[in-house]
């Protein structure tokens, strides 16, 4: 799926991060979401690698990356901890400044990078995601039904682990198909990669920890930033899926304009999985943005 990309593992202070890298030019970090791996970028990364150095990691706890032990605070799976992993990865690869593009949970790590490591981030693009504190604060009955997994995965261990682990293939495939636009078919190799990773009970546990962090320490960090009026200083591009039921309810541009001063964006004619469902349209928006900012 990633022709010409080199695979490697980089040890950070908190985890070992698996990644693929290719290309020359300004560095662009691509971050995946739940319940996927870096394979979500298989239709976007090779095109970007013609102009940029592209780095596609598996986030801490996902795919082939390390799954460090958590604790009652869930801080080891906070987006702050995941962001630090990636700063250290990019240091190891020799990039002091880079753009970051994040989809879903990866978008949460991406904006945390832009807040906590502003001097390192040349540009930020978030796909189909709003800040964590905003999502929780505007949750209502309809939102809770559509985003039921936020509540389920954040439940104390071992409830979601046992429920998901009873039939991980069913849970994974149900989520992927229900969040994609009707009729969309995932590439077989990508689908197989997601299935293989998600069958690991340690991945199921780690990804639940990701959501427990979202309901606790991540919410706290976002709330503190709001209270302090802290904003993202880099240019921000926001893209969202216009067929995605949850995204149709979200005022993405107005939301992100509260978090950054330089925000542009557009809806894309697909479901939740923009990099796979509409890679050409994503690239139409993303490549000029990265070209201007990097």
Image (tube, rainbow, N blue to C red):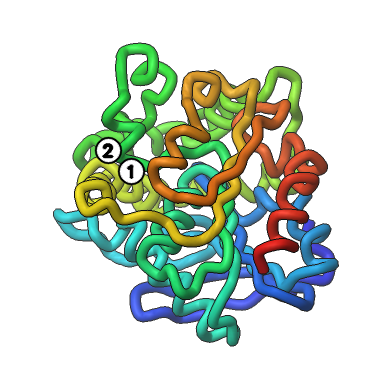
Q: Residue furthest top?
A: 141
Q: Residue at x 29, y 32 (%)?
A: 136
For the N terminus, the quadrant is bottom right
Query: Can residue 277 be seen here?
Result: yes
Q: Residue at x 30, y 45 (%)?
A: 214
Quadrant location of residue 264?
top right
Residue 173 is situated, as x and y percent measured from the top left of the image, at 58, 31
9 or 108: nearer the viewer: 108
Q: Residue at x 66, y 73 (%)?
A: 27
Q: CA distance from mark 1 to mark 2?
A: 5 Å
The mark that comes first in sequence, 1 or 2, is 2
For the C terminus, the quadrant is bottom right
Does 128 sit above or below residue 139? below
Q: Which residue is mark 2?
A: 154
Q: Which residue is mark 1?
A: 211
Quadrant location of residue 76?
bottom left
Q: Residue furthest left?
A: 72
* Side of 226 where 148 appears, left or right: right
* Side of 185 where 214 appears, left or right: left
Categorize mark 2 by other alpha carbons within 10 Å: few (<14), some (14-19), many (20+).
many
Residue 232 is situated, as x and y percent measured from the top left of the image, at 42, 57
Q: Secondary structure at mark 2?
A: loop
* Side of 244 where 43 appears, left or right: right
* Side of 114 where 278 appears, left or right: right
Categorize mark 1 by other alpha carbons within 10 Å: few (<14), some (14-19), many (20+).
many
């Amino acid at each position: 799926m990633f022709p010409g990309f080199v695979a490697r593992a980089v040890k950070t202070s908190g985890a070992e991060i698996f990644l693929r890298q290719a290309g020359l030019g300004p560095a662009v970090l691509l971050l995946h979401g739940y319940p996927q791996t870096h394979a979500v970028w298989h239709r976007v990364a090779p095109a970007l690698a013609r102009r940029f150095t592209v780095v596609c990691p598996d986030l801490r706890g996902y795919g082939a990356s390390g799954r460090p032990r958590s604790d009652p605070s869930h801080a080891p799976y906070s987006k702050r901890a995941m962001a630090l992993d990636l700063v250290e990865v990019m240091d190891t690869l020799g990039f002091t400044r880079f753009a970051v593009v994040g989809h879903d949970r990866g978008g949460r790590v991406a904006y945390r990078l832009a807040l906590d490591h502003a001097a390192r981030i040349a540009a930020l693009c978030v796909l189909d995601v709003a800040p964590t504190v905003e999502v929780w604060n505007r949750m209502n009955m309809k939102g809770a039904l559509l985003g039921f997994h936020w509540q389920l995965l954040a439940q104390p261990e071992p409830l979601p682990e046992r429920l998901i682990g009873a039939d991980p293939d069913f849970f994974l495939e149900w989520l992927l198909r229900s969040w994609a636009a009707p009729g969309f078919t995932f590439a077989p190799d990508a689908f197989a990669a997601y299935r293989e990773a998600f069958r690991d009970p340690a991945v199921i546990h780690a990804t639940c920890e990701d959501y427990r962090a979202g309901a606790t320490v991540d919410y706290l960090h976002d709330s503190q930033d709001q209270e302090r009026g802290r904003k993202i200083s880099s240019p921000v591009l926001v893209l969202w899926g216009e067929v995605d039921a949850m995204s149709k309810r979200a005022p993405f541009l107005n939301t992100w304009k509260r978090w950054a001063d330089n925000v542009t964006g557009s809806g894309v004619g697909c479901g939740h999985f923009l990099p796979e469902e509409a890679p050409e349209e994503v690239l139409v928006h993303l490549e000029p943005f990265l070209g201007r900012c990097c």
